[in-house]
Image (cartoon, rainbow, N blue to C red):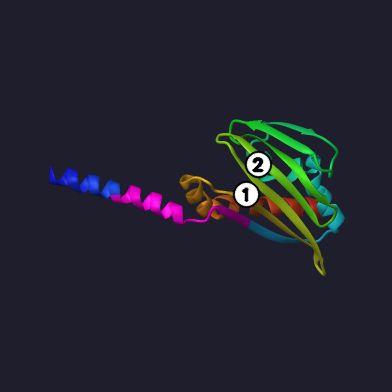
């Protein structure tokens, strides 16, 4: 009986830490990675803002090349849309919402499966002596306590995808 009380006490303490700690965590998250690409800002911009080119380098196409992808709208113009549905990558949409040629491409992400959420993902482009500096970022809101804990680990969860994606963008752009 004493062991059961100790076990229940530990569970109550852990739940309290989860909920109280979660209320103290930030309500937003932002992650980013940067790479220098030895190519013009116009070329690199079009490899990002044109979803037909995005298809060639993004890390999720490599994870599930057989996922169903639909691209619509005018490339590199607001409203340009990428829709996907896959077994491994889930489903959702990515819409270009800000297009500032050679400086910014920003997208609204709407994840539908395996869980519904929204985020903003974008790319900034800056000319440098070595070529073009590209920053890839993603930010979002973490309204619920589980979302706040997830936001805390988002940087670590997305590191591999962002790093491999930027490397593939670099390789494509430098050809």
Q: Nearer the viewer, residue 122 or 40?
A: 122
Q: Position of residue 7 (x, y in %)?
A: 22, 46
Q: Nearer the viewer, residue 27 or 164?
A: 27
The majority secondary structure of the magenta stretch comes to: helix
Which residue in the structure is indicated by mark 2? 60
Q: Quadrant of residue 115?
A: top right
Q: Position of residue 92 (x, y in %)?
A: 65, 35
Which residue in the structure is indicated by mark 1? 161
Identify which residue is drawn at 55% across, 50% down. 157
Q: Which residues are magenta?
A: 13-31
Residue 175 seen in the current view: no
> Which of the two labelled residues, at mark 2 and mark 1, occupies the earlier sequence position?
2
**For residue 96, above or below residue 173:** above
Identify which residue is drawn at 67% across, 42% down. 109
Instruction: Give the spatial CA distance, label 2 vs label 1.
Output: 8 Å
**17 in magenta:** yes
């Amino acid at each position: 009986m004493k062991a059961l009380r100790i076990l229940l006490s530990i569970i109550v303490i852990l739940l309290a830490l989860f909920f109280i700690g979660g209320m103290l965590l930030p309500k937003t998250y932002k992650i980013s990675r940067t790479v220098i690409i030895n190519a013009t800002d116009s070329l690199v911009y079009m490899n990002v803002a044109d979803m037909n080119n995005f298809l060639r380098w993004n890390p999720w196409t490599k994870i599930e090349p057989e996922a169903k992808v639909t691209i619509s709208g005018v490339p590199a113009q607001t409203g340009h849309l990428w829709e996907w549905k896959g077994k491994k990558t889930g489903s959702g949409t990515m819409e270009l919402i800000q297009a500032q040629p050679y400086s910014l491409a920003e997208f609204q992400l709407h994840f539908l499966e395996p869980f519904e959420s929204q985020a903003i993902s974008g790319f900034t482009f800056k000319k440098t002596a070595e070529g073009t500096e590209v920053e890839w970022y993603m930010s979002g809101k973490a309204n619920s306590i589980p979302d706040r804990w997830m936001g805390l680990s988002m940087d670590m969860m997305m590191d591999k995808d962002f790093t491999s994606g930027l490397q593939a963008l670099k390789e494509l752009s430098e050809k």
